[in-house]
Amino acid sequence: MTVSIARMEESGRWHARDVIYSSGRWSQLKTLIPTFELADFRVGPDFPSNPYMRSVFRKPRTVVEHLMPVGVVSNTHPLVQHAAVVEKCFEGIRNEGIDPLSLHCELGLTELGEWMNLRIYFPEKYQNNIDAKVGDVWICGLNASIPSMAIAV
């Protein structure tokens, strides 16, 4: 059975940017995750760089894309890739004996991908029943490539 990515009706906003949510298995959703790189913060190649700031660029995801600037950070800002946050979530899930690749996920990304919200839903046997209301059990991984929040897992 092939599982595909579904665009969700859920939407949101992060720092005045639209957030688009998709659902599916991680094996498909991971294709939506961008990667980023740090570069000198400068006016142009022949100008000095700012010693206190760095530029954050989204790397091209296709052959028709180019580097896309998404923000500016301090020169001490650790750039954590979204995929690394997801892997930390999956590491904890694997430690509990659950195959994370079998789990349903929901992924929220801003248009440029600089902010991510990943929800990983546990199997039904982990669902709880509190006051006759069934609640989903899930892990949430949040990450931003620009400094607006700490990494949350």
Image (cartoon, rainbow, N blue to C red):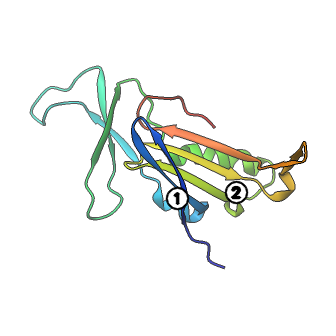
What residue is drawn where x is 27% and y is 49%?
67
Tag 2: amino acid: Pro
Q: Which mark is residue 3?
A: none
Horizontal relation, residue 122 to residue 67: left or right: right
Q: Which mark is residue 100?
A: 2
Determine whether the residue tagged by mark 1 lies in a helix, strand or loop: helix
Check disc 1 and report the residue beneath it: 30
Residue 31 appears at what percent x and percent y? 48, 61
Dot 2: few (<14), some (14–19), or many (≥20) neighbours within 10 Å? many
Rounded to the nearest angstrom, the CA distance separating label 2 from label 1 is: 13 Å
Residue most toward the left? 46
Determine whether the residue tagged by mark 2 lies in a helix, strand or loop: helix
Residue 83 appears at what percent x and percent y? 52, 49
What residue is drawn where x is 59% and y is 48%?
118
Horizontal relation, residue 69 to residue 29: left or right: left
Query: Looking at the figure, which quarter contains the N terminus?
Result: bottom right
Residue 78 appears at what percent x and percent y? 45, 30
Residue 84 appears at what percent x and percent y? 54, 45
Q: Are marks 2 and 1 in contact (CB under 8 Å)?
A: no
Tag 1: amino acid: Lys
Task: Specify the quadrant of the image occupied by residue 46.
Answer: top left
What residue is drawn where x is 69% and y is 45%?
139
Compared to 139, does 51 lie above or below?
A: above
Task: Specify the quadrant of the image occupied by residue 130.
Answer: top right
| Residue 119 or residue 64, whichever sits in front | 119
Query: Looking at the figure, which quarter contains the C terminus?
Result: top right
What residue is drawn where x is 25% and y is 20%?
51
Compared to 102, does 116 lie above or below?
A: above
Residue most toward the top? 52
